[in-house]
Amino acid sequence: MGSSVAVEVTGLHKKFGDQLVLKGIDLHIDMGEVVGIIGPSGSGKSTLLRCLNLLETPTEGVIRIQDEVLYARQAGEARPAKSAPGKLKTGMVFQQFNLWPHMTVLENVIEAPLRVKKTDKKAAIQKAEALLAKVGLLEKRDMHPIYLSGGQQQRVAIARALAMEPEIMLFDEPTSALDPELVGDVLRVMKDLAGEGMTMIVVTHEMEFAANVADRVIFMDQGAIVEQGTPETIFRHSQSPRLQQFLSNTSFTAFG
Ligand code: ADP
Ligand code: MG
């Protein structure tokens, strides 16, 4: 079975005002791959992820998601040749879970399928219940998010993203806002998802998760991909001084 393209990024640049935040990213990800992105704060990790679903508009470059060009603009062109998704193929989970506070857990999960996909309500509820069971929170279906722990809210956010049946899941530091004892449950849900073959791009500070779950780890610094490879290569045989320095500042000691 040949692998098919999930994400193909070429020459991606992003400026905020005069600040060049992404300096020409080239990235190829196959369907089924789990990619971890690590790097210091401010290196452009979130901006890259947000460009992949057009939460940020790139300055130039090409982004292809599966067989669809999501965004295309060459240097010097007045406007993008393409800058709109047909159907959004990516689901995103944010550091701050961003659940709707006035809705119950179940309502949070069925909202987008009902409004955006025009799914039949009964089918949407059935699907939502299955997803809530999957993340271990079916019994919270009628509660409002405020009564849930951060870890539970984040698992609802994952169920909500999955309800739209994305081809690719994007996670932006999904456990960074959580108390340490709540991190494990969220990582377990993500690990299960990876085990089921979901294509995932995970920006994370959890080096152990990146080492154990990712097929490939990408190290970003100052708006560029500095180094990428298998977890073993990145964590054990890193080449660039910048990555070595970054790793020496974390307490992670996998692979000795
Ligand atoms: P990371 O996720 O790696 O911490 P970000 O992608 O959030 O990095 O940010 C990269 C750089 O872009 C930072 O210097 C940040 O201040 C800047 N930046 C991010 N978002 C915006 C924005 N909406 N407006 C202006 N500058 C931004
Ligand atoms: Mg970030």
Image (cartoon, rainbow, N blue to C red):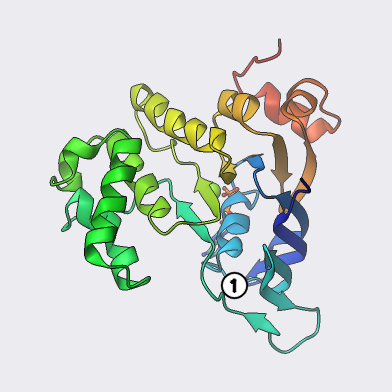
Choose between 136 and 218: the one closer to the eye: 136
Asked if 253 appears above or below 225 in the picture, the reply is above
Asked if 16 appears above or below 137 in the picture, the reply is below
Asked if 56 appears above or below 48 in the picture, the reply is below
Residue 51 visible from this viewpoint: yes
Q: Residue furthest right?
A: 239
Identified at 51% across, 31% down, the residue is 191
Left or right of 48 on screen, residue 142: left
Identified at 65% across, 14% down, the residue is 253
Q: On the image, which quarter does residue 66 sit in?
A: bottom right
Choose between 85 and 249: the one closer to the eye: 85
Write down the residue under mark 1. 57
Kindly tell me whether mark 1's CB lies below 8 Å from ligand 1.
no
Q: Residue furthest front?
A: 1
Where does the image place residue 143, in percent across and percent down from the top left?
A: 13, 45
Q: Residue furthest top?
A: 256
Residue 100 visible from this viewpoint: no
Quarter that holds the N terminus: top right
Choose between 46 and 139: the one closer to the eye: 139
Where does the image place residue 11, in percent across and percent down from the top left?
A: 79, 65
Disc 1: CA contacts within 10 A as few (<14), some (14-19) or many (>=20): some
Q: On the image, which quarter does residue 63 sit in?
A: bottom right
Amino acid found under the numbered disc labelled 1: Thr
Left or right of 3 on screen, residue 240: right
Total marks in image: 1
Q: Residue furthest bottom?
A: 78
Identified at 78% across, 20% down, the residue is 236
Quarter that holds the C terminus: top right
Report helix, strand or loop for mark 1. loop
Where does the image place residue 147, in percent across and percent down from the top left?
A: 15, 40
Choose between 220 and 165: the one closer to the eye: 165
